[in-house]
Amino acid sequence: MNIPNAPLVEIKDLWIEGRADETWMPIINGASTSLNKGEVLGLIGESGAGKSTLGLAAMGFTRDGVRISKGEVTFDGIDLINASADTKRHLLGKRIAYVAQSAAASFNPAHRLIDQHVEGPVQHGVSTRVDSVKDGIELYRRLRLPNPDEIGFRYPHQVSGGQLQRAMTAMAMSCRPDLIIFDEPTTALDVTTQIEVLASIRDIVEQFDTAAIYITHDLAVVAQMADKIKVLLKGDEVEEADTRTMLSSPKEEYTKSLWAVRSFQRPAKPSVPAGSVPVIRVKNVTAAYGKIPVLHDISFDIHAGRTVAVVGESGSGKSTAARCITGLLPPIDGAVEFDGEPLPRDYRQRDKMQLRQAQMIYQMADTALNPRKSIGEIIGRPVEFYMGLKGAQRRERVRELLNEIELEPDQFIDRLPSELSGGQKQRVGIARALAAEPKFIICDEVTSALDQLVAEGILKLLARLQDTLGLSYMFITHDLATVRAISDEVVVMKDGKVVEQGEKAEMFRPPHHPYTDLLLSSVPEMDPDWLTNLLAERGVENIGDAAVGKM
Amino acid sequence: MTFDNAFGDLIAFFGGAGTFLLALGVIVFAGFLLRSVGQMLDHKGETFNEMPLIIASILAILLLAAVSLFWSAFFGGRATLRTIILVVAGIALAGWLFRYLGQMFTNNAPMFRDMPYGVAFGYALAAAAVIGGVWLYFQENALFFRWAVQGFILFGIGAFLFRLLGRHVGTTGSKKLFRAMPLTASFGIYIILIYAVLAVFAGVIAPHGQEEIFTKVNVLPGGDPALGGDPDFPLGTDQIGRDLLSRLIYGAQNTVGIAFATTCLAFFLGGSLGFLAATLGGWLDQFLSRAVDVLMAIPALIFALLLMTIASAWAGSQSWLLTIYMIVIIAVIDSTRVFRLARAVGVNIVVMDYIEAAKLRGEGLSYLIFREILPNATAPLLAEFGLRFCFVFLTIASLSFLGVGIQPPLADWGTMVRDLAQFINFAAFSPLTAALPLLAAGAIALLTVAVNFVVDWMLHKSSGLKE
């Protein structure tokens, strides 16, 4: 069936529908693309754009409740839409592989990595178990997993997230497929881990001349990985072009707006007058979970009307610091002062007014809003609880708050959280915090679960609220682009210690603490040569977690 | 003498062990042979190459068993076994044929093309079962089967019409609910509604009182005087002349009503304590959980029986007091199961961010439990409610059957089954007589099935499983 010069994958005018509310809703409206051997296609778009659906359709697969209504998908001359289950069974895993977003959720926790790795080659008759194990170890080595001879004999929970993601890439490679579909493989990872995974994926795809479809919503990432980029918006194709053309001269308005997201930056504020009392002062706080110490003697101030970004990788103690401030985790030593007054350590000993002053906005809006309560109830509760407003007054205040977060009150007040998009949910979380009329808000990774455009909207909203209401923010994040956009001051944390702190402008100017430097250098940039240059400059041993390990 | 005996035992033991070891050796050798042959025939395949000897030996045992079965069926004159083997082989062949013909005639439509053989076999088996059912239906002495089929069809049609009604009458929300409802669920809801109506309006619907005694005893059901029936008592009368139809209807009121009250009490107790343990944690959680463990360690029915015996001594001659005691006893015993569920669901909800947000707001315990946790736990609790209702209901029926439950003259299905139980012996020559105890038993079974259909549906909905 091998026709010379024919594309490996060809998708022609593909229409896909999903079943919701007793009708078929369109998901993909007439997408076409083709992919040659060894080529990488980047699929980008916000959530709900149909990226993953299109990626899966390239395997001839649809999720439950989804159907291909018309169009063609051919892989190496085989019509995947009308292929029998038997034909597909021989293709999937062997010639087409898939790398899922969350490796931690995709590995079977009951089996060792290597046992899951060899399943494909053995079942497809590509190689015997013994050969496949050897090959697996070789792949682990090429993907630069630490301790490649032994890591495969561990269970998924004994391996870190970034390592799992690479083990999964190795697994996808085990049959040397012609096509791999990467579905947001680095979205859940820290920047320092992400860069390592990116480097190894790119390396291995080049080595074996594998074609790949790389799905992501991060433009800078796709710029490093893809030969050509396709932009999707709500199931419609926006445009497709090779990476360099796409980055330098996007044609469509939507693509341009995606590109512009990263340019949002607030004007610098005048520095804090000496001797002013900070809204929140964290003074020599040491905290522990049980007997395991997490925070060691950390101190920082947050002044009125300013944003302090707390940066660091996962496990560095950013969120624990927030828990100490709110009183959820009473510190062992040190104090948290509010307007110069020390707060009781445990939140249960704080009075209503003290609780009201410090509010929190959470990372996952899905778990932060009670799914059984309407938006009106969720926002109305703090209004009633703190302000004592009832009935019509309360409803009026809720409507005001909804207006403030740019959601139409008549449309949203009676909806449930499940009827909102991710960005709208996050806005409701902000409104709930505002309802208490606090002075100080902790934003815990509020934009990391959102698409870039939506995240930008949230950041702009937070900035506007700060300017009008004079709020102070503690902004916990691992995304340095966000820090650049919104913060006034930066606190860098590592292993429960404050490594560096100061004004934003100073932080982004050398000389840095080596860790700050590593964080800054790991943030992907829009330049398609960025990763290549970085690797050339530093070498594979000095990027990402490998470099952290050396510190 | 003792010495001789011991010696004999020793020889017998080693003799037995020797036989055993010999057999083991033969089997392992057979397994080894099997594996070698497999490796020779299929030298590329992984199946035989990496097969441990023990698996090969087990395969050998299975193979030997199959061969000996066939031998005794076809050469040892076991006629029944032969029939079974032939029928299974016939179904297997029919399944294969079905799939093959399907592929031929539909021009390889995806349904037949991608059908695994197991599914094809299942279709053939179902077809065989239907044919067998039809055959049994027309057999002269399969009276109960005929009744069951007729009842099933009747209720099935009723449920279908009920669902049709629900799809066209009511609010938009309820119409949508009925449209997405499987027939089993509408069957369940339909039956439960009928029972509820019977229980609530028992006094109006029942032709006679539950304690009324007539002169005609042991009238057979059917209402046909030629067969020993009486048109006044369509379902017959019991040994002391009480109308069975009326007692069945009043039984719905007593049994179902008491079971409902008991389940509600069990959920109130178990649910609130479970959520409390989940929210507060610490020593209270430990104390409550261990107390529940202790209660659960005692077999439920025996425990209930024991407590009921004590309670009946306390209650003396006041039978209503005994009923109250029974409700409390069963509720406490069953609340242990509810506690465990509520606690398990609760601890999963308590770690959510919105609970943390409510705690940081300074909300009290009752707001946390009833306004934040409870609304999110309703789906699993509701499903458990249906299941628990069935268990409570069966416990009451068992206790009444054992004579410590609902006290006569109140009608109760468990007591009715016990009182009429001896008539089951007449099934061989007088099916109508044997039907007497089966009426109440059938009422219990039907309600249990109906509730479980509804529970399954709710579980399916709450778990978000889609086809």
Image (cartoon, rainbow, N blue to C red):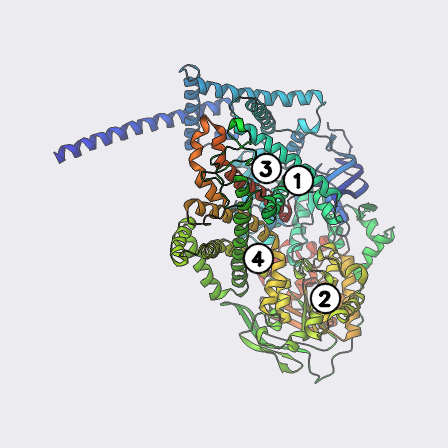
Q: Nearer the viewer, mark 2 or mark 1?
A: 1
Disc 2 from disc 1: Cα separation: 38 Å
Q: Earlier in the sequence, mark 2 or mark 3?
A: 3
Chain containing mark 4: B
- In the rendered image, residues at marks 2 and 1 fall on the same chain: no
The chain to which mark 2 is attached is A
Q: Is residue A15 left or right of residue A111?
A: right
Outermost residue, front side:
B215
Kindly check if marks 1 and 3 are in contact, taking CB atoms under 8 A apart as contact: no
Q: Residues within 10 Å of mark 1 (few under 14, many from 20)?
A: some
Q: Which mark is residue B182?
A: 1
Residue that mark 3 sits on = A120
**Quick one: label 2, few (<14), some, or many (20+) residues within 10 Å?**
many
What's the amino acid at mark 4?
A: Asn
Residue under label 2, please give it: A379
Q: Rounded to the nearest whole Å, what is the CA distance between mark 2 and mark 4?
A: 23 Å
Q: Which mark is residue B348?
A: 4
Three-letter amino acid code at the position of disc 1:
Pro
Outermost residue to the left: B1
